[in-house]
Image: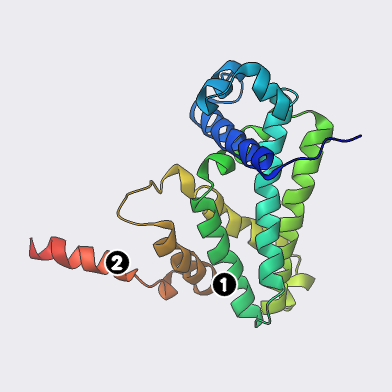
Amino acid sequence: MARIRTAAYDDQREAILAQAAALFARQGYTATSMNQVAAACGISKPTLYHYVRDKHELLLLVAQAHIDRLQAVVAEVEAQALSPRERLQALIERFVLAYADAQHEHRVLTEDVKFLDESARQRVLDGERRVVAAFARAVVELRPELAGASLATPLTMLLFGMINWMFTWLKPGGALSHAAMAPVVVDLFLGGLGAVQVPISRLGKTKKETVA
């Protein structure tokens, strides 16, 4: 008979994935040992193996959980009665904010998925492709003529180029937050440089700096 998982089990497993993601992001997947993961979680190594089979499965679970959360965001936005522009705007803003709360997981997704075996890597990549396809659909809904020109996916990848690597330069506690940058990304993608509005919080700081 299969073991019934309790809420406490699921909470502990999520905590393990979060600690593993932080370690993988900080020092790399190959340099991280299961002993280190167990120590970071405050549990014994045998207890850790009660939740995950090995380090490979741990990496897969971290990456898959992140992709699952992103696909859930897509589903929530697509379920709303939004205009094409509102839908694309909502997707962009929600993803920027989602990345703000999952910077370790996103770094793992972009840098460590290559260490998965072919089958596991394909599962993660298939999830990523579904996310990209959802954004491409939103682009085509706003600009239907782009489908015939085969530009929907390339434009979507350019958009993800802006979003995906924000974690490399937008640091927590800096002058700008992900919340402040989300509408900037929307403005830049939908309207070009001339449409970008300076975030109000940044304007306030600029005024103070000018007075000083």
Camera-side residue of 105 and 200: 105
Q: Which residue shows up at 62% across the image and 19% down it?
A: 34
Residue 89 has which mark?
A: 1
Q: Bin the neighbour count of mark 2 within 10 Å (Cα to Cα): few under 14, some 14-19, many 20 and up.
A: few
Q: Which residue shows up at 57% across the image and 59% down it?
A: 95
Camera-side residue of 75 and 141: 75
Task: Give coordinates of residue 118: x percent, y percent.
Answer: 82, 31
Question: How many numbered marks does the figure carry?
Answer: 2
Per the model, the C-alpha gap separating discs 1 and 2 is 20 Å
Hey, what amino acid is under mark 2?
A: Ser
Q: Can you tell which quarter of the image residue 108 is in?
A: top right
| Residue to which mark 2 is pinned | 201
Q: Which residue shows up at 14% across the image and 64% down it?
A: 208
Circle nearer the N terminus (1, 2): 1
Task: Give coordinates of residue 169: x percent, y percent.
Answer: 41, 45
Residue 151 in view, yes or no: no
**Apparent side of residue 39 relative to residue 50 in the rendered image (left or right):** left
The relative height of residue 27 versus residue 142 in the rendered view (above or below) is above
Direction right: furthest residue: 1
**Apparent side of residue 171 relative to residue 156 in the rendered image (left or right):** left
Colour setup of the view: rainbow
Camera-side residue of 146 and 104: 104
Task: Give coordinates of residue 148: x percent, y percent.
Answer: 79, 72
The relative height of residue 16 versus residue 182 in the rendered view (above or below) is above
Q: Tag 1, which secondary structure? A: helix
